[in-house]
Amino acid sequence: MAKRSRKIWSIKSELLTKSREAMLSAVQIFNNPNIIFKSESFIVLVNISWTYFMHAYYRDKKIDYRYFEQKGKRKRYDKTKRGAYKYWELERCLNDKNCPIDKIPKSNLNFLIGLRHEVEHQMTTRIDDYLSARFQACCLNYNHYIKKLFGDEFGIDKHLSFSLQFSSISDEHAKQLNEFSELPANIGSFINDFDNSVTEEEFNNPQYSYRVLYVPKTANRKGQADKVIEFIPANSPEAQGLNKEYVLIKDRERPKFLPNQIISKVKELGYNKFTMHKHTKLWQSKNAKEKEKGFGVEVANTWYWYDNWLKEVIDYCGEQGDLLK
């Protein structure tokens, strides 16, 4: 029994070592200014990292994480053509009833799993800025769970630091982060669909997407520490007192609505005579699909309206009054 326990610990230790190395490699690649293929590499490596992590956990708990069929009292294991066992992929690990990962960190991982399916079959470009908040949350979640489940000595926070930037974030850049226009159609469509599948509460949770307030700051006196990035809780007096010189960047896509969703929301307000035809006539009369007006965006050949257009429609219906009720 002691020999078996040592073997379990040895394999678990090896899995954790590989898991940590994969996660650290993912971060190092993403922070490397000489590498263009950042996000794609990060996504693949963190999937590997979390898979090894989950295998280590299940091995530690003596839970069989190999695919098999139960034949009476015997297990018939699935194997590859070369005779190797088929182990659970990350998605199967997360779906198991014994999974120790909470709901919102799971959503973050399921997002990255789905994104990996999109990027592994075709080339992508310019997706780093759109996804960094999800990546940051993934790293923090990993560090939290590996320390919680295996001990503080396995944490990776002591090996990491903030990457330095050679460009500042302008108002125009911040605005561009909210647009899908430069994303590949399949990636933009996937992000939009996944974000719409989670609740507002889940989306705003830092375990799903970790957003940072960047504040230019100088020390008040000589010898005082001056951090490049300062973290400020959203409900703190400091955050409430920030003036307009500071830019709060939320790495989330703006809410988007299909035309039928616009109609449905307007009818919920009692304007039952506002039809799809009337909606089409309205946006055409206002040239609302002109890009500079900012009322919506085209994703994968499908037009989505922003919330400011919904407000525009509601205001129009209010002006028409009983004619649309």
Image (cartoon, rainbow, N blue to C red):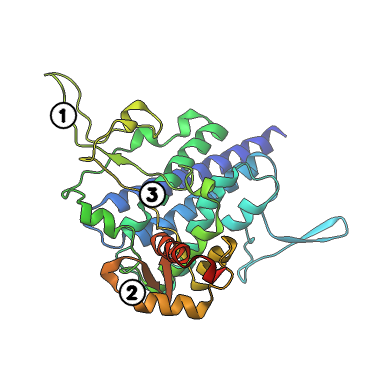
Task: Name the residue nearer the viewer: 235 or 59.
Answer: 235
| Residue at the image position 31 percent from the left and 57 percent from the top | 177
Residue 133: give its label: 3
Instruction: Report if the CB atoms under discs 1 and 2 are less than 8 Å apart.
Output: no
Left or right: 319, with 107 as reference point: left
| Residue 210 placement (x, y as % from top left) | 41, 44
Classed neighbour count for the residue bearing mark 2: other residues with Cα under 10 Å, few (<14), some (14–19), many (≥20): few
Residue sitting farthest toward the front: 322
In this view, 223 is above or below 318: above
Q: Nearer the viewer, residue 276 or 14?
A: 276
Instruction: Identify the residue under disc 1.
Output: 218
Q: In the image, is 65 to the left or to the right of 14?
A: right
SS state under label 3: helix
Residue placed furthest toward the right? 72
Q: Which amino acid, mark 3?
A: Ala
Disc 2: which residue:
286
Q: Are marks 3 and 2 in contact (CB under 8 Å)?
A: no
Mark 2: amino acid: Lys
Q: CA distance from mark 3 to mark 2?
A: 35 Å
Q: Nearer the viewer, mark 3 or mark 2?
A: 2
Structural crowding at the residue carrying mark 3, measured as other residues with C-alpha within 10 Å and reported as few (<14), some (14–19) or many (≥20): many
Quadrant the C terminus occupies: bottom right
Residue 285 falls left or right of residue 243: right
Quarter assignment of residue 254: bottom left
The label nearer to you, 1 versus 2, is 2
Q: Is residue 208 left or right of residue 38?
A: right
Q: Residue at x 39, y 46 (%)?
A: 136
Residue 283: image quadrant is bottom left
Residue at position x 43%, y 45% from top? 137
Does the image show residue 74?
yes
Which numbered disc flags the more N-terminal residue, 3 or 2?
Answer: 3
In the depicted view, which residue is nearer to us: 283 or 206? 283
